Image (tube, helix red, strand yellow):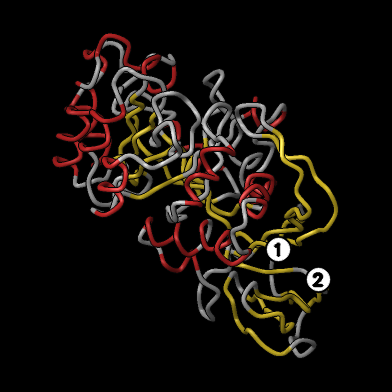
Amino acid sequence: MKGQFVLRNVKRVNNEKKIDIVIRDGKIAEVTKAGSGRGYVLDHSGVYVSSGWIDLHVHAFPHFDPYGDEIDEIGVKQGVTTIVDAGSCGADRIADIGASRNRAKTNMFAFLNISRIGLKRVDELSNIEWIDKEKVVRAVNEYRDVIVGLKARISKSVVCDSGIEPLHIARSLSSKTSLPLMVHIGSGPPNIEEVIPLLENKDVLTHYLNGKENNLFNGHGKPLKVFTDAIERGVHLDVGHGTASFSFKVAEAAKQHCIGLDTISTDIYRGNRINGPVYSMANVLSKFLYLGYSLEDVIEAVTINAASWLEKPELGRIKVGDVANLTLFTVKGGPTTLVDSEGEKRVAERRIETKGVVVNGEFFEC
């Protein structure tokens, strides 16, 4: 639905008072008392509204297997208005990402894989010759409207015998392009204590709650010093749930030690959307409600916090005059079984369900 319409009787996470939001010509025209907005009415009594959810780590290039999916399948159909592809494409195929972005309803940005082949292979950093520095710089200059950072997957199955060298190259490319890094961590080598000291302020550490042996917590569940040092210097923590990168036990240890919640992302693609354990952004957010985070903290992680990292504050607020990007959702009671990437199960008493989105002024029901 386009044109002028009213989201009636919605409520904000931090205020149970019902309001109307009037959308006109693609923008938020009014935020007013419930029942007073004029236009075609979409009654959402009792439904929460937030600025549009942002997923900072997805794989939205359907041509690569296994890590691929259609943009809108993991965007608007999930209640997510903005996605960031996390390095599916390198310089060889970034033009295709740009073209598919223009055909989608969902807002989309991308991290550029430092390997020119991207995820055409899952060991894309095993051959240093696949890191073409000049092509990286050219791609960044040509697609500045799309590319928000550089992606380096630094785990054993990706780098193989290249070790830590791809991350050193990524660091130099970050300096040349003035773009932050998103660094994937997983099984070693390289050892996590080699990797983390190379991350700087605003770099994104994704999969920080993974349960693999090479993780960020010692055998007693205490965060490693390299991890706490990284947090102090402004490294951004991103969940990146994925098929193999989220552990309830590690997440519980992080909360116990007051590790902050920066952004919650899914690392979603076709396989883990259909078969789990990700399924949807709402499913992942429900896991953090189960862990004891407040609804406000959980929603901020996919709105204000993500928009702040992207340096696009308008995506993380509800303000008259801004382009309308909104997510509508409920919190339902009743037992729900949630599963992490280790196969561990937890029974939650609340779950988040999406009801609809407004993307660039157009309403879609979920």
Residue in view at x 47 percent, y 64 percent: 304
The CA distance from mark 2 to mark 1 is: 8 Å
Disc 1 residue type (three-letter): Leu
Read off the residue under disc 1. Answer: 328
Say whether marks 2 and 1 touch (CB < 8 Å).
Answer: yes
Secondary structure under tag 1 reads strand
Above-or-below relation of 325 to 366? below
x and y percentages locating residue 334 in the rendered image: 85, 53
Residue in view at x 22 percent, y 46 percent: 200
In front here: 33 or 217?
217
Q: Quadrant of the N terminus?
A: bottom right
Q: Residue furthest front?
A: 220
x and y percentages locating residue 92 in the rendered image: 34, 23
Which of marks 1 and 2 precedes in the sequence?
2
Above-or-below relation of 196 to 256? above
In front here: 139 or 279?
279
